Image (spheres, helix red, strand yellow):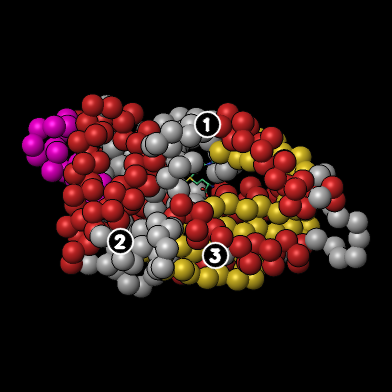
Amino acid sequence: MEREQLSLHMNGGKGQRSYANNSSLQRTIIRKTRSILEETITRSTQLNREPPTFQFYLNDLFGNDFNTIFKSLPGFYERLLEDKGHKFSRCFINATPGSFYGRLFPSNSINLFHSSYSLHWLSQDPLLRSREVASLNKGHCHIVSTSPPEVYKAYLKQFQQDFKLFLKSRSEELVPGGAMVLLFFGRDETPRRTSFEVTSLILNDMLLEGLIEEEKMDSFNIPAYKPTVEEIRHVIEEEGSFFVQRLEILISPWYEGINIEGGDGFFVDGNVRAEYITKNIRAVMEPLLSTKFGGEVINELFIRFKKKIEQIMEVEKLEGATLVISMTKNH
Ligand SMILES: C[S@@+](CC[C@H](N)C(=O)[O-])C[C@H]1O[C@@H](n2cnc3c(N)ncnc32)[C@H](O)[C@@H]1O
C-alpha cells in the first residue's frame, strides 16, 4: 500500500452504511471530552476583546467525501445563527485535502489544531518493506495474540516515525503559543482486543476456507496502531516542540453511543449491540478492505464479524481506550 492511500477513507455519503450515520461512538466520546477542547481554546485566545473571526480548515486525505460535508454547511451555518446569533456569524469554513503526515499550511498561520479519531491511522503498511517480519505474521493482517514481538516493533516504529512528523509539521504551522487537542484510539495496561485483531482473525478463517487469495492476504496489513501513553509521551519528548498540558485516557465499551434510553446500551441484547458495533466498524473499514479483497467478500466478512462479536461478548467485555491530549507549542 502506498503512502497517503486513496483507499483509506470512511464510507462516504449519508446512506445506511455511511460513516456519517454510523459514528455515534466517536460523536459520544467527542462530546464527553469537549471540556478539554474548550479549556484549550480559552487558554489560546485573548480575553476581553471582540469575538474573534473563526476560520476553520477541515483536513482529510484526498479520497475523503468532502462533498457530503460541503452540502451540510448551509444547515450548519443556519443552526449557528439560531444558537449563537450574529456575533458568531463570522465563521468561515475551508477544506484542506492532504496527509497530515507532512505540511498542510503555511508557517506560523494556525492558532489551534484539533484532530479526532485519526492519528491511530499510519501513513503506510508497517510491514510492507520487511518481508521477513511479515512472514512471521503470515495469515494475519494486524497484531494478533500469536504475533511475535517483531511485529509489534514494526508497528510501533511506523507510529513513532509518523507521529513525530505530524508534531514537527504542526509545530511549524502553529503561531507562537498555539495549541493542539488530539483524540485518538490508544491502549492502557489492560490487554484488550481490537477491532483490527478481530478483522484479521476473520480474514484468516476466510483465507483457510479459500474465500480470499493468499497473495492478497500476504500483501496487506491494516495501517493502524493504538499506542500507549508512554509511547506517545516518548515521541512528544523526543520531538521537543510541545508541552503536554493534559493527557487523559477514557475507557468505553465498543457499543458506546448506542443511545438507548436508560443506560448506554446496558439493557440492549447482544444481537443489537453486535449489529451496532459491526455497522460502525464497517463504515470505517469497508473502503480499505474492499479495495484489497474485492467488494464480493465484504458482506460475508461483516456477517462473520457480527457473529464473532456476539460470541466474544458472551465471555468478555469489549472495551477500547481513547487518548485525549492537550498540548501547547514550546517557545
Ligand atoms: C474515523 S475517521 C474520523 C473522522 C472525524 N474526525 C471524526 O472524529 O469522526 C478517520 C479519518 O482520518 C483520516 N485520515 C487517516 N490518515 C490521515 C492522514 N494521514 N491525513 C489526513 N487524514 C487522515 C481518514 O481518511 C478518516 O476520514
Q: Quadrant of residue 125?
A: top left
Label 3, ligand 1: CB separation under 8 Å: no
**x and y, in percent, of residue 96 in the image:** 64, 35
Specify whether 165 is left or right of 159. Answer: right
Is residue 86 covered in magenta? no
- How far is mark 2 from mark 3, CA to CA? 22 Å
Q: Is residue 215 above or below residue 130?
A: above
Q: Are marks 1 and 3 in contact (CB under 8 Å)?
A: no
Disc 3 target residue: 32
**x and y, in percent, of residue 61 in the image:** 53, 35
Residue 141 versus residue 206: which sits nearer the camera? 206
Q: Residues within 10 Å of mark 2 (few under 14, many from 20)?
A: few
Asked if one can make out residue 108 in the rendered structure from this viewpoint, the answer is no
Amino acid bearing label 1: Asp
Mark toward the viewer: 1 or 3:
3
Disc 1 target residue: 65
Lower sequence index among marks 2 and 3: 3
Specify the quadrant that holds the N terminus.
top left
Mark toward the viewer: 2 or 3:
2
- Residue in view at x 39 percent, y 53 percent: 225
Q: Which residues are magenta?
A: 195-214
**x and y, in percent, of residue 219 in the image:** 26, 35
Helix, strand or loop at label 1? It is loop
Helix, strand or loop at label 3? It is helix
Disc 2 target residue: 268
What main secondary structure does the magenta stretch of the protein show? helix
- Residue in view at x 30 percent, y 56 percent: 273
Q: Quadrant of residue 284?
A: top left
